[in-house]
Amino acid sequence: LPVTLELKDFLAVVFQHEIDHLDGILFIDKVTSFTHGGDVEV
């Protein structure tokens, strides 16, 4: 059952953070990519 939400600001960041967990992505994965000159997908 697809769900569509339109979020902004802090709540959007929180939701993306939690969706990343479901996809097996940790915050440190994004930070490491950023600090090594890679692109950060948001």
Image (cartoon, grey):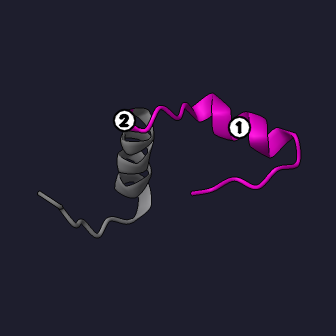
Closer to the chain start, of discs 2 and 1, is 2
| Relative side of 33 to 42, left or right | right
Residue visible at 41% across and 53% down in the picture = 10
- Indicate whether 4 appears above or below 41: below
Q: In this view, does 22 lie above or below 38?
A: above
For this rendering, which residue is in front, 18 or 8? Answer: 18
* Quarter of the image that includes the N terminus: bottom left
The local secondary structure at tag 1 comes to helix
The residue pinned by badge 2 equals 22
- Dot 2 crowding, Cα within 10 Å, few <14, some 14–19, many 20+: few
Horizontal and vertical percent for residue 24?
47, 32
Callout 2: SS: helix
Q: What residue lies at 45% left-to-right and 41% top-to-bottom?
A: 20
- Decide: is 25 above or below 11: above
Amino acid type assigned to the residue bearing label 2 in the image: Leu
Residue 35, how many percent across, how many down? 83, 40
Query: Which stretch is magenta?
Result: 22-42
| Residue hosting label 1 | 31
> Which residue is at a point 34% across and 53% down the rendered structure image?
11
Counting labels gives 2
Label 1: few (<14), some or many (≥20) within 10 Å?
A: few
The circle drawn on residue 1 is: none
Query: Farthest residue in the left direction?
Result: 1
Viewer-nearest of labels 2 and 1?
2
* Residue 39 is one of the magenta-drawn residues: yes
Q: In this view, does 38 lie to the left or right of 28?
A: right
- Give the residue at x 66% y 40%: 30
In this rendering, would 24 be left or right of 39? Answer: left
Kind of residue at badge 1: Val
- To which quarter of the image does residue 39 belong? bottom right
Quadrant location of the C terminus?
bottom right
